[in-house]
Every structure is written in C-alpha cells, then in structure tokens.
Amino acid sequence: MIIWQLFISFLKVGLLGFGGGLAIVRLIYDSIQPFLNMSQEMFANIVAISQITPGPLAVNTATYVGYEAAGIGGAAAATFGVILPAFIIVSLVGRAIQKFRDSKAVNGALSGIRPATMGLIAAAAATLVRPSLAGDGRLGTGLLTKLGADAGSGLFTVISGSPVDVISVIILVATVIMIAKYKKSPFFVLIIMGCLGAILGV
C-alpha cells in the first residue's frame, strides 16, 4: 500500500537525516523516486517552495511529496514518518544530555558528525545546482532577446545562448553577498529575489 510505503520511506529519512534541512535534501530526493520519479528541476522547485513556506524543509517536502503521491492520506503518512524519529530521539536524548555532556565519546561523535553534515550539504548543492543554474526555464529570455535585437546581437546573443542561466548566477551571487556580507534577512532576500524572478520570468 502506497501510504504505508510513504510512511516507511520518510521514516528512514527522519531516522538517517542527520543535520536536517539542506543536509538531507539528497536523501529526500533519492527516497521519493519510487513514488514520483521526479526530475532534479522539479525537485529543486519543491525545495524552493519548502524554503519560503513556514516549517522545516524536510517536513514541508514530505507533506508535498506525500500529497502528490497519494493525496491527503499520503501527505499525513509522509509527514508523520519524517517527524517521528526526531520526536522519539530528542525525547530520549533530552533526558541523557546532562549525564553525557562531558563524555569524550559523545564529543568525538559530534566532532565526526559536523564534517559529515557539511558533506551532506555539499551533496544537496550538487543535486540542486544544475536545475537551478542550467535548467530549461531561463530567466530573462524575452528581455535578452529584445536587447539582442536592439543591440545587433553581440554580447546578448552569447549570454542567451550560454549553457548556464546567467541571470540565475547573478541572483545566486547577489544573495550570498546580501546575506553573508551585509547581513540582510534571508526572508527579505527571498522575497526580493522571488519578485525579481517573477518579473524576469514573464
């Protein structure tokens, strides 16, 4: 039964998804293939939606995938599956954290998990980079075509024919600068870039 399969699949995601958020994006993507056989570009759209809607990325993604695969029952099963391990583990760890906080083994385990988490985030980036920066839907296609016609091709033709979505790359760099250097709110930056993408996507 697909609802049970969704529950088990996302139970594994919740149980093995160390680091949460972007660190388990690749794990989620691999887990949903038996249900939806989703392209990387469509999955990148789901991640983007999950990032701008309230709640954790894993929960939002599980709910969306579950609904697409089996309606409301599928959404409930996938959501419950992904949150159950965290609920149980945190309940148990919360009681033991004081007892083992000075343990060398525990501190060593955490020291090993941190770089592994960075590797998981890098794997997520590898999954999302191509559809985000070189997908079929290019931003500003109409604008670049018009500018190219007005300017007699040249640079605009090169940009519009590039295998990489140049405007998406500019948005990526601008986002990093605004958040890392100027400490702007990620929520504010997402709204601005979403509006810019809506304008250029027409």
Image (cartoon, helix red, strand yellow):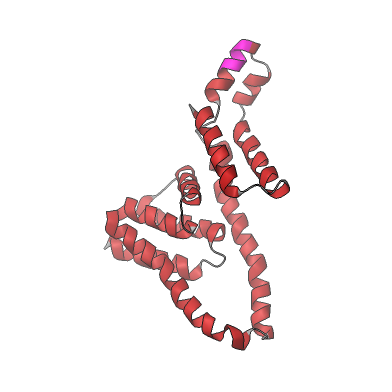
- Position of residue 175 relative to residue 155, above or below, is below
Viewer-closest of 136 and 195 = 195
Q: Is residue 41 visible?
A: yes
> In the depicted view, which residue is nearer to us: 188 or 65?
188
The answer to whether residue 137 is magenta is no
Q: Residue at x 31, y 58 (%)?
A: 74
Q: Residue at x 42, y 65 (%)?
A: 82
153 on left or right of 10 = right
Residue 151 in percent (x, y) is at 65, 12
Q: Main secondary structure of the magenta part?
A: helix
Q: Position of residue 179 (x, y in %)?
A: 66, 47
Count of all numbered marks drawn on residues in the image: 0
Up-down relation of residue 86 to residue 68 (above or below): below
| Left or right: residue 36 compared with residue 137 | left
* Residue at left offset 38%, top offset 56%: 63
Q: Say which quadrant the N terminus sits in.
A: bottom left
Percent x, y for residue 129? 58, 45
Residue 110 placement: quadrant: bottom right
Q: Which residues are magenta?
A: 146-150
Please tell me which residue is depicted at 38% across the width and 67% down the height of the picture.
81
Where, by quadrant of the figure, is residue 114 drawn? bottom right
Q: Is residue 186 left or right of residue 49?
A: right
Q: Percent x, y for residue 186?
A: 60, 48
Vertical arrangement, residue 146 with respect to residue 185, above or below: above
Viewer can see residue 6:
no
Residue furthest to the right = 181
